[in-house]
Image: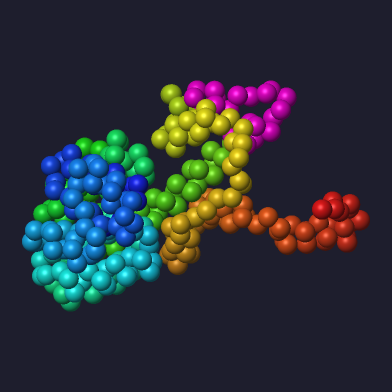
Amino acid sequence: MIGLGRMGANMAQRLMRGGHTIVGYDPAEGARALLEKAGAATAASLPQLVAKLKMPRVLWLMVPAGEITDGTVNALLPLLSAGDTIIDGGNSNYRDTQRRAAAAAQHKIQYVDSGTSGGIWGLAEGYSLMIGGDAAVVERLRSIFEALAPAKDRGWGRVGPVGSGHYTKMVHNGIEYGLMQAYAEGLSILQHKSEFNLDLHQIAEIWRYGSVVRSWLLDLTADALEKNPTLKGIAPYVADSGEGRWTVADAIELGVSAPVITLSLLERLRSRDKDSFSDKLLAAMRNQFGGHEIKKE
């Protein structure tokens, strides 16, 4: 296991529960210490990690997409041997995954991509795994995926060749954007209806049972509203890690209409503009053509 952030460490613990021997590496000493506390061995460097693993080796990466993944894969390839396998469990762009798999193949190293959903709750609930790679290689690794999934026969599967796992996870995250935006907008409408003095946590709890809009996201929303009903201290700034952008770009490339996902992404971008030039210009235009009052800062 490479990359022992909270999610990576939780995955390592779940694998150990499934009877797998884990050696973990993270450049942060504190992250390694946490894994050691959970009962796993660690390594202080990638060469040391590779040396501690029995052949054929299986290395699971849980690192941020982009340069960090590239750097880690490039550092690993000279250390590994033919027949070893790299599994990228992060949110890499599927085109990058295909490129890395081609580079690994030149070293006769197998490359598997696992779109991984479950976040910090995966240790208890299991992870949803969307896997891309050679069918025989995925089958050989079955016990790993079964240990991580919610059940041996549920919540995981090979969806296609290398790159397809990350592609499926990309679209999964695009859908997630739309679901989150719909919940946020609906509850905001309720919050603004001051006439009824609605209890949003109570309503979310009602919706969780029997409603057609019930979901795990709604469960988490209800939990957040119970802990902080007014959302005090939370800035109205919504980050994105890239998958929504990639989903929208691919929808455009494929000629597929995806307005909900696209608008949910744009709303995230809008949340970061604290000094919106476009909104100021709209106010100025209204003043120009209609003499409408401009609100001063």
- Is the residue 22 above or below the residue 84 in the image? above
| Percent of width and height locating residue 189 | 64, 35
Q: Residue at x 23, y 65 (%)?
A: 46
Farthest left residue in view: 55
Vertical side of 204 occupied by 140: above or below = below
Image side of residue 252 versus residue 193, left or right: left
Residue under the point 57% across and 53% down: 268
Residue 219 magenta = no
Using the rendered image of the protein, determine whether residue 250 is visible from the camera's viewpoint. Answer: yes
Q: Is residue 188 located in the magenta-colored stretch of the structure?
A: yes
Image label count: 0
- Magenta region: 187-206
- Residue closest to the eye, 139 or 3: 3
Query: Furthest-right residue in view?
Result: 291
Residue 169 at x, y percent in the picture: 35, 53
* 165 to the left or right of 225: left
- Residue drawn at 89 percent across, 52 percent down: 293
Image quadrant assignment for residue 184: top right
**Residue 266's quadrant in the figure?**
bottom right
Quick one: quadrant of the N terminus? bottom left
Residue shown at the point (83%, 61%) measured from the top left: 285
